[in-house]
Image (spheres, coloured by chain):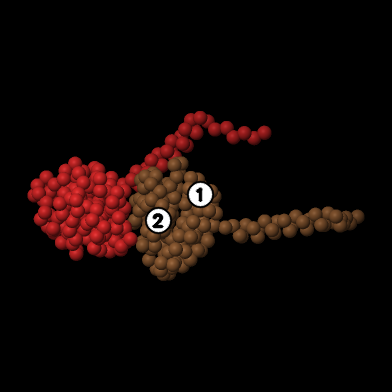
Chain colours: A brown, B red
Amino acid sequence: MKKTFTIHKGKKSQVDDFIHARRRMLEELNQVQHRLEEVDEIRSVTYVNDSSATSVLGTIDSMRCIPDPVVWICCSTPYDRDFILMSSIVRHKVKAIIMCGKEAHDVRSVLEGSVDDFVITENLKKSVEAASALAIAGDVVLFSPSCAPGRFYKDVAERGEDFRAIVAQLRNQD
Amino acid sequence: MYTTKLDPAEISALTDRLLIARSNNLKKILEIEHRLETVGEKEGVEFLNDSKATDSTATMYSLTCMDKPVIWLLSCVVGFEDFSDLKAVASDKVKAIFYLGETNDLLVEDFVNEVDVVQQCSSMEELVQEAFNYSREGETILFSPATPSSDIFGNYRRRGEEFRKCVGNL
């Protein structure tokens, strides 16, 4: 005897709901803010906001997505991070590291040999200025802090907005 | 029931291998050329190449390592003119400053009371020559640029090589 399966009318609407919810979630995934977001292009240098990268692994993923030479702005944190994980990708992709914040000596000892220029600055504004001085046409300035927003910012969004505002200032000076 | 049971010896063998690989990696990373490297000595004056110092914190470390009077050579690049955090270290160690690149009024202003001479030079040969002329026996000439390298020389290795070559020519 041939069996047939029919979806009950009530059940069908349940399935539809499920699919709708799933589609919504996928769409929301695409709209994640502060993740590899192109902010501006000044003198053929692209400024990318990746404030969502709250760990070393997040930054590694972001670097994999960028084909051009990278000037990387990283933020300092009192917590330990394992930068050996990224020494090889830094060697291949990154031409300069700008550390924002003074607690940067752990990073220096591990990653300094992999890049040409290693600069420590006091705040984000100075970091962006240093990055714009170091980047030449075709480079990407990547703001990927590899740490939680922590002490200076309320959340990732606020940190990203701060970066955007500084880049906008840079655009006005240009 | 499946359980994954590992022999304690096996576990320690695994982790030992990881630890060895890791310490080898670290050793490789910590060996950096052009960092406080003695490149020559002439008439009792020692020449140190510290081209890897691409910012002022690195130079601060190098200056604190010095025990003899220092003649400090640096290079100035647009956008990285501020060396005021080195003032305290420089005042008791550094005798003279010779610099390469852009004219830097801020540097002169900051250090004119701390050291005897602040002088601009137009090329690496001139820089090394001037510093050597000024130096006396028992002093150190330290090339620690405290600025990124990409502007004039391309990278720190080329910058260090250039310095080495000029010292060799003396």
User: Which circle's residue, 2 or 1, is located before the other in the chain?
Assistant: 2
In this rendering, the count of numbered labels is 2
Frontmost residue, B12 versus A86: A86
Q: Position of residue B79 (x, y in %)?
A: 33, 61
Q: Position of residue B111 (x, y in %)?
A: 22, 52
Q: Position of residue A123 (x, y in %)?
A: 41, 52
The chain letter under disc 2 is A
Q: In the image, are marks 2 and 1 on the same chain?
A: yes
- Amino acid type shown at disc 2: Ser
Frontmost residue, A74 versus B24: A74
At x 44% / y 63%, what residue is drawn?
A169
Residue B95 shown left or right of residue A99 in the figure: left
Crowd band around label 1 with a 10 angstrom C-alpha radius: few (<14), some (14–19), many (20+):
few
Cβ atoms at labels 2 and 1 below 8 Å apart? no
At x 19% / y 64%, what residue is drawn?
B122
| Image quarter of the C terminus of chain B | bottom left
At x 51% / y 30%, what residue is drawn?
B8
- Amino acid type shown at disc 1: Tyr
Q: Note whether B160 is above or below B1 in the view shown.
A: below
- Rounded to the nearest angstrom, the CA distance separating label 2 from label 1 is 16 Å
Is residue B19 in view? yes
At x 22% / y 47%, what residue is drawn?
B90
Label 1: which residue?
A153
Q: Where residue A127 is drawn, which disc sits there? A: 2
| Circle 2: element type | helix
| Image quarter of the N terminus of chain B | top right
Frontmost residue, B37 versus B56: B56
Q: Note whether A148 is above or below B123 in the view shown.
A: above
Crowd band around label 2 with a 10 angstrom C-alpha radius: few (<14), some (14–19), many (20+):
many
Q: Where is residue B30 in the image (x, y as percent from the top left)?
A: 33, 45
Is residue B52 in view? no
- Mark 2 or 1, which is nearer the eye? 1
